[in-house]
Amino acid sequence: MPDFSVLTDYFDVYMEGFLNTIYASVIALIASFLLGTVIAVFRISSVRPLRWVGTVYVEFIRNIPLLLVVYIFFLGLPLLGITLNGFVCGTIGLTVYTAAFIAEAIRAGIMSVPKGQTEAALSSGLTYVQAMRYVVLPQAVKIVIPPLSNQFLNLVKNSSVLSVIAGLDLMYFGDKVASDTYATIDTYLFVAAFYLVLTLPLSFAAHRLERRLAKHG
Amino acid sequence: MISFRQVEKHYGDFHVLKDIHLQIGQGEVVVIVGPSGSGKSTMLRCINRLETITSGELIVSGQAVNDKKTNINRLRRNIGMVFQHFNLYPHMKVIDNITLAPRKVLGQTKQEAEQTAMYFLEKVGIEDKANQYPSQLSGGQQQRVAIARGLAMKPQVMLFDEPTSALDPEMVGEVLDVMKALAGEGMTMVVVTHEMGFAREVADRVVFMDQGRIVEEARPGEFFSNPREERARLFLNRVLNH
């Protein structure tokens, strides 16, 4: 039986971290989705320099550890005269890192829609943008939802990386409580529970959406 | 209506279309036949610029298809296309498949577009399927929806790219019947097909292609009873006597 006094005595501390983890996750989720979509469009663009930028971005970012990406922002930006706190740097790093994976998921989704769909749309007089919007993307979304929800879950969990640069997130305060109380196992069990409070509903919501979209076609 | 003059097309080192000359007039039904890989589909797909030509001149409704100044979206409105694999939009009901382009391209209201769609669905004999999804239809029904989708834009030309090749044999007839009826109404049609019976019965002109060239061009009666070219004779022997 875990020692619940570790939870009750430090509840405010957990909550502060919990809320910061939510903030960081929501901001990074929205930002990485937007950035990832742009990178995905770059990667399938017919303009070669754009394709190049997209490929370099994805291959570099997804092939270095997240911790290093975050360090680069935290330690690198001050060298350029920009000093931001751990929370902001961590959220930026998280966004930049996750966007690479999201870009790949979206690109794969678009590529998996048969070429004949675009051809049918274009041959009826729709513009390329209309063909994308009404024909290709609605079909790509269905394919993209499972890998995308995976990335979003990873993002929430990966936000614990903020703790190493004083990001004031859930993990950061968990470490604090653990070193204050020496009840390490109990503390980290409660921290895990807090993460589950965030990730389980997200996971269920993704499954429901998947099922709803799978009904047709 | 459609005019190819000295058209060439290369895919890298592969010379797909060689010195193509072809004139198609309004109301004509031209059937293109030939062995697979002879360039039939490629030639058809050049007409609405799903493929680009390397050189030569290709004019459709008075506009040079590959001219940068040509508004290709505007030109494509007037050219309906039916594909081998139907290419219906699986996430939309039959009726929405048909009304998408009239609404988004021609700016018709939903009501207007649905009226037109129902008219053409009736014409191809499946008005009762309007609210189903393509996956709930047989191949023959799907292809008839695809034809209705093309017609709903009231195009001046309809292109058919092997419209019956992906169908089960017992569904070929229903699609060919729709195409025959369309030809009877004076629609300009360019049809790539292996259905020699259709070519013989419906075509005003048969174009035989082999290895990227138009080898023979004749009225169907002439072409089938007395082909001038040796290659055409060999081809007909193979497809008709088996």
Image: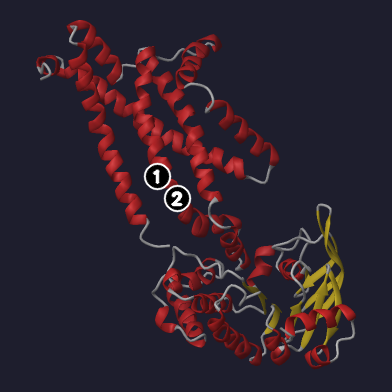
| Quadrant in which residue A21 is drawn | top left
Q: Position of residue B133 (x, y in %)?
A: 42, 70
Label 2: state its secondary structure: helix
Q: Position of residue B110 (x, y in %)?
A: 44, 72
Quadrant housing the N terminus of chain B: bottom right
At a point 44% along the width and 34% down the height, the residue shown is A31
Q: Callout 2: 10 Å neighbours few (<14), some, many (20+)?
A: many
Question: Which numbered tag is attached to residue A146?
Answer: 1
Q: Is residue A87 above or below residue B201?
A: above
Determine which residue is flagged by label 2.
A143
Q: Are the residues at dot 1 and dot 2 in contact (C-beta closer than 8 Å)?
A: yes
Q: Is residue A181 visible?
A: yes
| Quadrant in which residue B38 is drawn | bottom right
Q: How many marks?
A: 2
Of B169 and B204, nearer the camera is B169
Question: In the visual, does A109 lie left or right of B194?
Answer: left
At a point 74% along the width and 66% down the height, the residue shown is B42
Q: Label 2 marks which chain's residue?
A: A
